[in-house]
Image: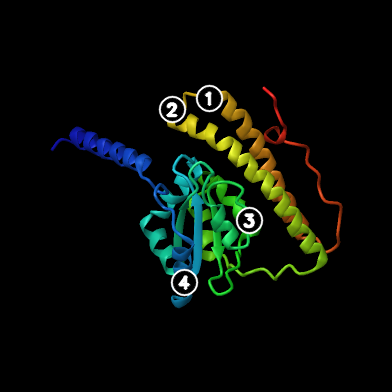
Amino acid sequence: MSFRFLVLITLLLQSTAALASADTPYFSGHTPSLAQITAAQQQAQRENKLLMVILGADWCHDSRALMQNFTDETLHRQLAERFVMVRVDVSYFDQGDGVTEHFQQPTFYGTPTVMIIDPHSGQVTNKADWQHWTNAASYSSADYQAYFLEQSFVAPPQASSPWQQQVTAFEQAQAKRVEAGFAAVGPLLKTYIESDRTEGAAAFSQLWRELGKFRNQVFNDVQRLRALEEPVALPEYPAQSWEVHRDD
């Protein structure tokens, strides 16, 4: 077999693998019930592991990047030694909120959201930086190794002070606004994606950017407020376009 022929075969196999990877349904069809998630949590308890719940979607570049990195043979084996993993398809933002609420989180703020949960207490241990993985495609294999395999995940103390309770109420109120934004952008996203990104691009992109700025600001402000011991004035955000009544 000639060297040239071997090169052609190699390129063909690489192209086929890339195509298969692009078409792999990492999240589609993964809609576990709360009973199934509870069973996974109990399994993590028995096996002395952490529970990892990933909320993502196959249309999301970073969700796919996360799962593609997780399929690396060595990393996959190491992750399996430390975590029981559950995938949750958020579809077009019309699924998944029941899962976050089950773990006392008012919403998720983007895709993918990786929740690492203490299986005994049910507390999310990585809330402070879970937004990190909404940019999963930007990180190296070393970043994945450092976060998932080398970092310690310890449940934070219960927020019981009046100030922390105030922050919780603030986040819950803003989370409803985020979810209203998801409800508004979801149908536009569905049209855009299912038309192979040819229909409704302008309307979708405008709202997507606005919502992205808002949801990230809310998340970052909540984490900043959580770190404070003394009360400060809570942020106020102007009405967003999906909250403004239109007659047209």
Nearer the observer: mark 1 or 3; the answer is 1
Badge 4 amino acid: Ala
Q: CA distance from mark 1 to mark 3?
A: 33 Å
Taking the spot 86% from the left edge, 55% from the top edge, the residue there is 232
Taking the spot 20% from the left edge, 32% from the top edge, the residue there is 4
Tag shown at residue 44? 4
Tag shown at residue 140? none
Nearer the observer: mark 4 or 1; the answer is 1
Which residue is the extreme one toward the left? 1
Q: Are marks 2 and 1 in contact (CB under 8 Å)?
A: yes
Mark sitting earlier along the chain (4/1): 4
Q: Are marks 1 and 3 in contact (CB under 8 Å)?
A: no
Q: CA distance from mark 3 to mark 4?
A: 22 Å
Residue 7, position as x, y percentages in the image: 24, 36
Q: Are marks 4 and 1 in contact (CB under 8 Å)?
A: no
Q: Which residue in the protein does label 2 denote? A: 195
Q: In the image, is 38 to the left or to the right of 130?
A: left
Q: CA distance from mark 2 to mark 3?
A: 34 Å
Tag shown at residue 129? 3
Quadrant for the N terminus, please.
top left
Q: Are marks 3 and 4 in contact (CB under 8 Å)?
A: no
Q: Which residue in the protein does label 1 denote? A: 200
Residue 166, position as x, y percentages in the image: 79, 59
Q: Quadrant of residue 15?
A: top left
Can residue 98 be seen by looking at this rendering? yes
Mark sitting earlier along the chain (1/3): 3
Taking the spot 61% from the left edge, 48% from the top edge, the residue there is 109
Badge 3 amino acid: Asp
**Helix, strand or loop status at disc 4:** helix
Badge 1 amino acid: Gly
Can residue 82 be seen by looking at this rendering? no
